[in-house]
């Protein structure tokens, strides 16, 4: 039978106390980070700044992309190449309700 090593009660108590103090300091540090972040965001809002990315296409570029796509003059890839952005950006700026659907030819159905 193996006996566990002897432990002193004061070592366990001191360890718990140290752990408690470290956890209080960690919590204080986290609350300071959150408070500073909120203060920074409030200051930025006061200066008129908003969060997030700036749009890749200006309003005029988005309107031109809509016009080109709606008139079926260019494909989405050609429009993306024109503005130097990926296709997903062009799709994000297109208003699908304003585009004319392409005439899709239906394949004739075979004999039933």
Image (cartoon, rainbow, N blue to C red):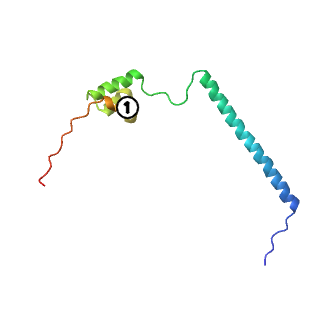
Mark 1, secondary structure of its residue: helix
Relative vertical location of residue 12 with respect to residue 40 in this rendering, above or below: below
* Above or below: residue 18 compared with residue 104: below
What's the residue at 73%, 40% (across, down)? 29
Residue name at image x 65 percent, y 28 percent: 40
71 vs 112, left or right, is: right
- For the N terminus, the image quarter is bottom right
**Which corner quadrant holds the C terminus?**
bottom left
Q: Give whichever of 32, 85 is nearer the camera.
A: 32
Residue 101 coordinates in the image, percent (x, y): 26, 34
Q: How many marks?
A: 1
- Position of 32 compared to 86: left or right? right
Task: Judge whether 24 appears above or below 16 on screen.
Answer: above
Instruction: Identify which residue, 22 or 96, lies in the foreground.
Output: 96
Residue 29 or residue 87, whichever sits in front: 29
Query: Outermost residue toward the bottom?
Result: 1
Q: Determine the image quadrant of residue 47.
A: top right
Q: In the image, 101: left or right of 46?
A: left
User: Dividing the picture into quarters, in which one does residue 48 lie?
Assistant: top right
Q: Residues within 10 Å of mark 1 (few under 14, many from 20)?
A: many
Residue 42 image position (x, y, % from top left)? 63, 27
Question: Disc 1 marks which residue?
Answer: 90
- 11 up-or-down from 88: above or below: below
């Amino acid at each position: 039978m193996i006996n566990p090593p002897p432990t002193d009660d004061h070592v366990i108590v001191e360890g718990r106390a140290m752990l408690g103090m470290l956890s209080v300091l960690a919590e204080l540090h986290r609350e300071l980070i959150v408070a500073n972040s909120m203060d920074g965001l409030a200051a930025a809002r006061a200066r008129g700044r908003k969060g997030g990315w700036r749009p890749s296409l200006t309003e005029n570029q988005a309107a031109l992309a809509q016009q080109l796509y709606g008139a079926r003059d260019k494909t989405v890839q050609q429009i993306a190449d024109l503005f130097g952005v990926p296709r997903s950006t062009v799709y994000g700026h297109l208003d699908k309700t304003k585009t004319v659907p392409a005439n899709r030819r239906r394949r004739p159905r075979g004999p039933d």
